[in-house]
Image: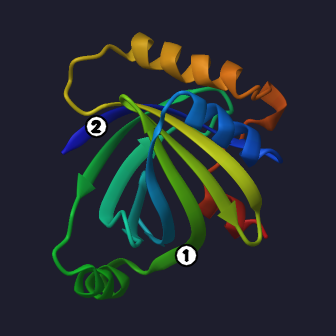
Amino acid sequence: MTIQNIEIKARTQNQAFIREKLLSLEAVFKGIDLQTDTYFIVPSGRLKLREGNIENHLIYYEREDQQSPKSSQVKLYKPENPAALKEILTQALGVKVVVNKKREIYFVDNVKFHLDTLHSLGQFVEIEAIDNQGTMNVEELYVQCRFYMELFRITPDALVSESYSDMLLKI
């Protein structure tokens, strides 16, 4: 399945404020997911196996590293046996890095929100305006993303261009 996604990631010291805003919008809380993302060595893009108590997918995506809202094409596969797939991918490709995080997951319509905590990196918020039906144009997704950035008072200097994997590789 291919999904069109416009997203931002930002550092935050105020997840409680964002959580309150989401609850005031009657966001659907999906739960707290303790996720392990294993990134594999690939020639282009990013390939990761996400293992969590809520989300479990093999995810391939290509995305520019930029601080403003960015577009990505995401391909998802839900494996029946993640452990076996992980073993195969580890042997065939090698592991680049492993990311462990605590993630709160919320939805307002087609927009997904993550409140992430990573032990060695800190706290973040991610906003993903998602079109998985092919019914929205990219500009509509950008507008949604920008709306929530303003609502959550996310300033340009808080935006992060890199993935967690890239950030961890620099430590």
Q: Earlier in the sequence, mark 1 or mark 2?
A: 2
Residue 89 horizontal/vertical position (percent): 31, 79
Q: Quadrant of residue 51?
A: bottom left
Q: Eyeballing the image, is 170 above or below 29?
A: below
Residue 157 horizontal/vertical position (percent): 83, 32
Q: Quadrant of the C terminus?
A: bottom right
Q: Quadrant of the N terminus?
A: top left
Q: Which residue lies under the disc numbered 2? A: 3
Q: Could one spot residue 170 in this view of the protein?
A: yes
Which three-letter amino acid code belongs to the residue tagged 2? Ile
Crowding at mark 2 (Cα within 10 Å: few <14, some 14-19, many 20+): some
The image's mark for residue 129 is none
State the residue in front, 153 or 10.
Answer: 153
Does residue 22 appear left or right of residue 138 in this picture? Answer: right
- Distance (Cα) linking label 1 and label 2: 24 Å
Does residue 33 appear left or right of residue 161 in this picture? Answer: left
